[in-house]
Structures are given as C-alpha cells and as structure tokens.
Image (spheres, rainbow, N blue to C red):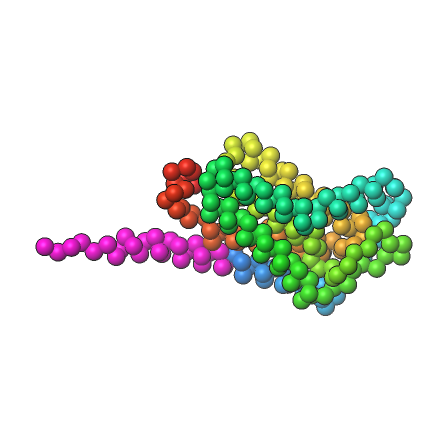
Amino acid sequence: MVTPSIAPANRRPRAGRLRRVGRGIFDGVLVAGVVTTLAFLVRVKFDPIIDWDEAAIARATAITRSHDGFRATLLAWQTAFLPTPCYVVATAVCVWVWRRHHLTTRAMWAFVTMMIGWNLALDVKLLVQRARPVVGEPIETAPGFSFPSGHVSNVATATTAVIVLIWPLLSHTSRRAAVAVGTLLIALTCLDRVFLGVHYPSDCVGGVLLGCGLVLSSYAGYAGWKPAKQLTCWPF
C-alpha cells in the first residue's frame, strides 16, 4: 500500500504566504522609492518644490498671525495629536480588538506596524536633515528636522492602521465614515503644521506617503493570514 503524498497540499499554503510576503515587499519598495524621490528633490532644493513650499508658508502664516483664535486652535490641535497620545489611543484600540474580538494576530500586526512607523519617521528625518521653515515673525517653533512631518506621519500611520485593523468589524456605511474621518484627521494635521509655520507642504506630503504607505504595504504582506483559532470568530 502506497501512502498518499501530502507535499502538494503543504506547498500551497507556503506558496500563498510567499506571495503575500513578496507583495508586501514590492509595495514597501515602491513606497520607499516615492518617499526617497521626494526627499532627494527636497534635499537638492528642486526649485518648483522649494518655491511652492516658501509661498505656501508665507501665505499660511500671514493668515494665522491675523487671527488669534485660529492660532490657539492650531496650537491645541498640535498638542492633541502629538505622537504619544495618538499611539496610546491606537494601542487601546488594538487591545480592544484583541480582547473583545479575539483577532490576536491582526491586533499584533497593527501595533508592531505603528511602532515601526513611529521610529521610521524619526530615522528619515535624520537622513534628510532638512531645516525647518524660516519665518520672519515665528508663530511656533519646533525642534529637530523638517522632512517628513512627524505629526503628519504619525497621525497617518496610526489612523490608517486603526482603520485597517477594525475594517472587518464595520458595516459598509461605517467603513465609508471611518475613511472620511481618517482622511479629515490627516488633512487637518497637514494644515495645522503649515499654518503654524513649522513644516513645509512637501514635509506633510512626505509624512502622508510614509505613514499611509507603510501601513498599506505592511498589510499587503499580512492580508490573508488565517490562523485556525481566528477562523472560528471572524473568517477574513
């Protein structure tokens, strides 16, 4: 009697995992290429980008200086969306998804990805070393380098990770609302940094690309991984 071979069945899941990892790596390299290109153009002071940045900063800060209430709102937003409170809230969501819905690996994926994103934004700043905007009458000052915006990158990372994390738990309408709210949070954080004069628009674009791109490329490598324990709860 010949025992049937189970090698083909074993190879199929392994091949699927390799495809997912390969897709995640490909997407990650693509995101890195886009962010690196923008960082290079900023680093060499590519005139169209620099001119756009400087003009935007001049107009935005002029508006902020003429409205005290607007300035106070911008400063409050800056404080509320510092990295630590953002990641504390996002981590609490990870814990809730883990404890309440038993999506353990999904929650772990989101948490680890966010921590990588937090550190990666700092690393890119050190590599690019772009100086902060120089404003004649400073509205606010900030330490460190300018590209990418840490506020924007971290808000984009945390927001995107949370939306992807809870996506299977949401209805169709709730998904649309989550994307709308997340987009609004990221956009308002970009405006906050520019109107306070602490970041150029291109710094904010870099932060969005880095934060959203990291999470989505990471998820491309994670998606479809279905441990047996999770299948009994949520077959996604």
Q: Residue furthest bottom?
A: 44
Residue drawn at point x = 72 percent, y = 44 percent: 80
In the image, residue 98 lies at what x, y percent?
Answer: 50, 42
Find the residue positioned furthest to the left.
1
Q: Position of residue 143 (x, y in %)?
A: 77, 59
Is residue 103 toward the left or the right of residue 72 in the image? left
Asked whether the viewer can see residue 55, the reply is no
* Residue closer to the observer: 211 or 158: 158
Q: Would you say residue 148 is visible in this rendering?
A: yes
Q: Quadrant of the C terminus?
A: top left
Q: Which residues are magenta?
A: 1-26
Q: In the visual, does 50 lie left or right of 118? A: right
Foreground residue, 103 or 214?
A: 103
Q: Residue at x 51, y 50 (%)?
A: 109
The quarter of the picture where the N terminus appears is bottom left
Toward the viewer: 36 or 232? 232
Work out whether 21 lies above or below 230.
below
Above or below: residue 7 compared with residue 128: above
Q: Is residue 41 placed above or below 84 in the rendered structure?
A: below
Q: Main secondary structure of the magenta part?
A: helix
Image-quadrant location for residue 186: top right
Tell how many labels: 0
Q: Is residue 204 magenta?
A: no
Q: Is residue 61 left or right of residue 106?
A: right
Q: Quadrant of residue 137?
A: bottom right
Q: Position of residue 43 (x, y in %)?
A: 71, 66
Q: Nearer the viewer, residue 231 or 24?
A: 231
Q: In this image, 53 relative to 227: left or right?
A: right
Q: Is residue 17 magenta?
A: yes
Q: Which x, y percent locates residue 168?
A: 49, 38
What's the residue at 66%, 52% (across, down)?
Answer: 153
